[in-house]
Image (cartoon, rainbow, N blue to C red):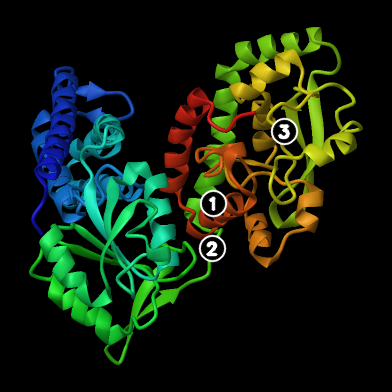
């Protein structure tokens, strides 16, 4: 596959950043080795660092951590990085065990993990740079959208919403070869052909991505033919599996008599990763409460001076439908619940949600707290007592749960979160359907890397204040 020039630069920058991280860890090992013995780690032999560094670089290559398709977007990049670091540490540990060399221990338990942390930080810096460039319309891959008018329109909307992916739809092919109502475009994207012209259009337009959506007449034989026609081009074929936002570890290829089938496994919320999530929740809540203690006290005093109790307590529904008391800093007048009925007619929220951009019940202090999400900080105590998680679906009210359909009920398979996909994707600006879809996407595709990504992006969402009111 021929890469764009910016892709080659980005891959080279990532390799250089990772190599720099490994070199720094080797240098740290050399400095520590001047004293020979490090408490809890043992004798640090700098010479072993060369082997450790080479192992890290080799496993970064073997784990495809430099694949341009995952760099700069999603959590898969960091999953591969963590897998490479862990593999290198295990390999060095086994070599040390086989050679009865204790000198490997400081590198396995200290310096290789340090290289992983530095590499992750370097990749985050590179991501911030490419996102700034993409915000200016640069470093994007041209996409040819293929399918019926409805599915192509939905794909265009999704790609525009997901700016960080770095895709831009520049053309569309639909069954009739023309947009509806005599128009020549769909949502501003020109229609450039019908379904029979996809390969030719991709060749002439130098499209890098050919995204195939549902459309009448798309048989396996036709998709095979399209894939064969695209093999000699720089275009990559992406096919919508129609599996409702399910991806990652739950999708497996199971060949049956040579026929590859996508196998969808049930979501699991047990095992080491799930235990790790709960440990991170408790430990993270304690650290955040200690770090934010001065801010919490300041906010509490401000709310008290504004009149009324400091905390607002409300019944919410948690995992498996169990109700719990959720804590927030009070941001409304004391009788806000009683005044709700009089405002129902002005509801701007969708579905069972009640939202008003200019809710008259919000106090002066409460308005500031809501803009910066400070009113939600007491939910850290909910995380600490196990009724909530740092990351998860939005905690619903019992009246909302009573109206849930089968799809929305799946949100209750996990603990609600202090933040989540809804928090970083628009919050109150989302429709009810978008909110449900984001929560379901989280439940169906949960993993630790996704949690880490959401926590990182929450900071930007809070600072931008988008959808906070």
Quick one: SS at disc 3? loop
Number of residues whose C-alpha sits closer than 10 Å to that of mark 3, classed few (under 14), some (14–19) or many (20 or more): some
Relative to residue 65, is residue 406 depicted above or below?
below
**Residue at the spot x=49%, y=66% of the render?**
244
Q: CA distance from mark 3 to mark 1?
A: 22 Å
Judged left or right of residue 60, residue 314 is: right
Quadrant where the C terminus sits is top right
Question: Which residue, given by chain and number where applicable, does mark 2 sit on?
Answer: 268
Please give the residue where the numbered disc 1 appears in the rendered image: 438
Residue name at image x 84 percent, y 18 percent: 309
Quadrant of the frame with the N terminus: bottom left
Q: Position of residue 125 (x, y in %)?
A: 27, 29
Q: Is 341 or 323 nearer to us in this picture?
A: 341
> Neighbour class for label 1 at 10 Å: few (<14), some, many (≥20)?
many
Q: Percent x, y for residue 155? A: 39, 58
Residue 45 in sight in this render:
no
Q: Residue at x 76, y 54 (%)?
A: 401
């Amino acid at each position: 596959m021929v890469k764009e020039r910016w892709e080659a630069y980005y891959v080279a920058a990532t390799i250089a950043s990772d190599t720099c991280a490994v070199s720094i860890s080797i240098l740290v090992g050399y400095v520590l080795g001047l004293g020979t013995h490090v408490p809890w780690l043992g004798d640090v032999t700098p010479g072993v660092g060369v082997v450790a560094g080479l192992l890290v670089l080799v496993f970064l290559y073997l784990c495809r951590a430099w694949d341009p398709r995952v760099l700069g977007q999603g959590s898969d990049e960091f999953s591969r990085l963590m897998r490479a670091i862990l593999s290198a540490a295990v390999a060095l540990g086994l070599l040390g065990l086989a050679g009865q060399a204790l000198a490997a221990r400081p590198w396995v338990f200290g310096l290789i993990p340090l290289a992983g942390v530095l590499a992750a930080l370097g990749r985050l810096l590179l991501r911030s740079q490419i996102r700034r460039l993409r915000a200016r319309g640069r470093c994007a891959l041209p996409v040819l959208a293929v399918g019926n008018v409805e599915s192509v329109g939905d794909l265009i909307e999704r790609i525009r919403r997901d700016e960080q992916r770095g895709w831009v739809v520049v053309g569309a092919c639909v069954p009739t070869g023309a947009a509806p109502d005599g128009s020549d475009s769909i949502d501003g994207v020109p229609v450039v052909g019908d379904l029979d012209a996809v390969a030719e259009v991709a060749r002439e337009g130098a499209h890098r991505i050919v995204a195939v959506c549902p459309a009448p007449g798309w048989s396996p034989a036709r998709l095979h033919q399209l894939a064969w026609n695209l093999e000699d081009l720089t275009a990559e074929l992406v096919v919508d599996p129609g599996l409702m936002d399910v991806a990652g570890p739950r999708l497996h290829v199971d060949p049956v008599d040579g026929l590859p089938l996508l196998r969808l496994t049930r979501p699991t919320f047990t095992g080491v990763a799930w235990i790790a999530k709960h440990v991170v929740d408790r430990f993270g809540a304690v650290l955040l409460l200690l770090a934010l203690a001065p801010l919490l006290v300041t906010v509490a005093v401000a709310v008290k001076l504004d009149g009324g109790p400091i905390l607002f307590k409300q019944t919410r529904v948690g995992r498996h439908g169990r109700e719990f008391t959720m804590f927030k800093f009070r941001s409304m007048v004391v009788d806000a619940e009683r005044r709700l009925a009089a405002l129902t007619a002005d509801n701007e929220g969708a579905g069972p949600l009640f939202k008003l951009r200019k809710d008259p019940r919000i106090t002066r202090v409460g308005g500031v707290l809501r803009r910066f999400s400070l009113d939600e900080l007491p939910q850290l105590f909910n995380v600490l007592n196990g009724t909530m998680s740092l990351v998860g679906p939005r905690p619903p009210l019992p009246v909302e749960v009573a109206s849930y359909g089968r799809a929305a009920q799946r949100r209750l398979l996990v603990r609600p979160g202090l933040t989540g996909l809804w928090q970083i994707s628009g919050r109150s600006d989302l429709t009810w359907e978008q909110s449900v879809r984001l929560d379901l996407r989280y439940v169906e595709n949960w993993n630790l890397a996704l949690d880490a990504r959401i926590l990182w992006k929450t900071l930007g969402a809070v600072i931008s204040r988008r959808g906070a009111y």
